[in-house]
Image (tube, grey):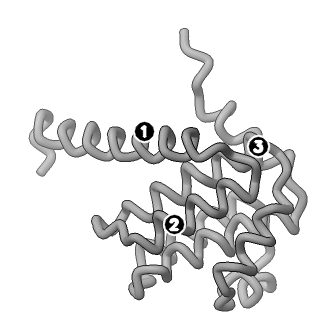
Amino acid sequence: MSSFNMEDQMSYITQMNEEEKIIFLKILVALARADGNFDDNEKAFIKDLAVIFGIHKDKAPAILEETSDDKLVKEAAQIKNRQAALQLVKEACLLANSDGDLSEREVVLIGKIGQAMGIELEKIEQISQWVIDRIVWLEEGKLIFEQI
C-alpha cells in the first residue's frame, strides 16, 4: 500500500502559521492573474483553498491585492517548511496549467518563488512535469471511460 495519500499531502497545512498560509494564497492569486485572465474557476480554487486553510473572510482583501513579483518572491522566502514549499510549487503548477495557457511569466514566477523557498530548480521542473503528466493522464481517463 502506498503512503502517498491525501492525508499525508494535507499535513503541511497544520505546519504553517496564518501568515504563511496568506502568502501561499497570495502567490496563487498572482499566478492566476499572470496571464491577464483571473477566471471564475481560478477564483473558486483560491476560495476553496482559503477555507481548507481556515483563513477568515476578512483576510480576503490582503490576499487579493495586486503584489509585484519581486515582493511575492521576498514573501515566499518566509515559507521555510519544505513540505509546504513543495506543495505550493505543485499547486502553482496546477493553477498555471488549469486554463490550458501556461505563459512564460507563470513559468518564471513559479521558478523564482520555488527557489526563494529553497526548492531546487530541478525539483521544480520535476513537479511541473508530474503535474503535466497528471493532467494528460486524467484527460486520457475521460476518453477511456467515455466521460466526454
Secondary structure under badge 2?
helix
State yes or no: discs 1 and 3 in contact (Cβ < 8 Å): no
Query: Which residue is rendered at x = 54% and y = 60% of the image?
Result: 92
- The correct choice, above or below, for 60 with respect to 45 in the image is below
Viewer-nearest residue: 60 or 87: 87
Upstream in sequence: badge 3 or badge 2? 3
Q: Secondary structure at mark 1?
A: helix
82 on left or right of 138: right
Could you tell me if the residues under marks 3 and 2 are in contact, i.e. CB atoms within 8 Å? no
How far from the left and from the top, in percent, is residue 114?
A: 65, 55
Residue 99 quadrant: bottom left
Residue at the (68%, 46%) spot, across then down: 119
| Relative horizontal placement of residue 16, taking residue 125 as reference (left or right) | right
The residue nearer to you, when weighing 70 against 147, is: 70
Quadrant of the snapshot with the N terminus: top right
- The alpha-carbon separation of the residues under discs 1 and 3 comes to 19 Å
Disc 3: which residue: 12
10 Å neighbourhood of mark 2: few (<14), some, or many (≥20)? few
Q: Is 141 rendered above or below residue 124?
A: above
Q: Earlier in the sequence, mark 2 or mark 1?
A: 2
Dividing the picture into quadrants, the one containing residue 120 is top right
Q: Which quadrant would residue 123 be assigned to in this image?
A: top right
- Residue hosting label 1: 130
Residue 22 visible here: no
Mark 3, secondary structure of its residue = helix
Q: Position of residue 131 (x, y in %)?
A: 42, 45
Q: What's the residue type where badge 1 is placed?
A: Trp
Q: Give the labeled residue for mark 2.
A: 108
Determine crowd level at label 3: few under 14, some 14-19, many 20+ residues with C-alpha closer than 10 A. some
Residue type, label 2: Val
